[in-house]
């Protein structure tokens, strides 16, 4: 996201970021999804847990898939963090 990237961009253990542009034409979006499915990653971190990020998480092949535990959309993740207070998270 626009907020997370500047914070994490110089982290020594992160060698690649994939930043999703919301206003992407359909054909480019489909190519993007295929590229996600073709590659293998060490770790996926999904802190949004919305329908789109959940779909991406199922397409992406990663050794570790981390997200918050919720009442739904927990399948497919290897690490589920405790729920959070939205006010503290924001």
Image (cartoon, rainbow, N blue to C red):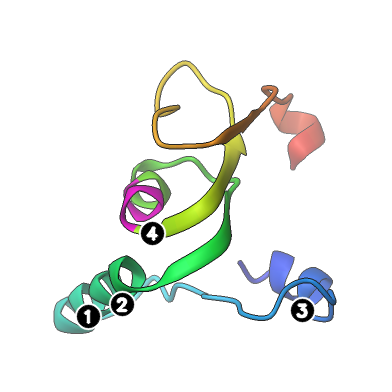
Circle 4 SS class:
loop
How far apart are the alpha carbons under marks 1 and 4? 14 Å
Give yes or no for contact between labels 3 and 1 (Cβ–Cβ under 8 Å). no
Mark-to-mark CA distance, 3 and 1? 25 Å
Measure how far apart labels 2 and 3 are at the Cα level. Answer: 22 Å
- Numbered disc in front, either 2 or 3: 2
Q: Is residue 77 above or below residue 27?
A: above
Q: Which residue is pictured at 41% across the width and 21% down the height?
A: 72
**Dots 4 and 3: beta carbons under 8 Å?**
no
The mark found on residue 35 in the picture is 2
Q: Which mark is residue 9?
A: 3
Is 11 covered by the magenta stretch? no
Q: Residue at x 60, y 46 (%)?
A: 47
For the residues labelled 2 and 1, the Cα–Cα distance comes to 6 Å
State the residue position of label 4: 60
In this picture, which residue range is highlighted in magenta? 55-59
Quadrant the C terminus occupies:
top right
Residue 38 appears left or right of 80: left
- The answer to whether residue 7 is above or below residue 67 is below
């Amino acid at each position: 996201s626009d907020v997370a990237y500047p914070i994490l961009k110089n982290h020594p253990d992160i060698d690649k970021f994939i930043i999703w542009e919301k206003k992407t034409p359909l054909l480019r979006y489909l190519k993007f999804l295929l590229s996600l499915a073709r590659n293998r990653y060490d770790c996926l971190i999904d802190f949004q847990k919305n329908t789109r990020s959940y779909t991406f998480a199922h397409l992406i092949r990663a050794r570790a898939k981390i997200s918050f535990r919720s009442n739904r959309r927990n399948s497919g993740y290897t690490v589920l963090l405790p729920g959070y207070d939205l006010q503290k998270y924001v």
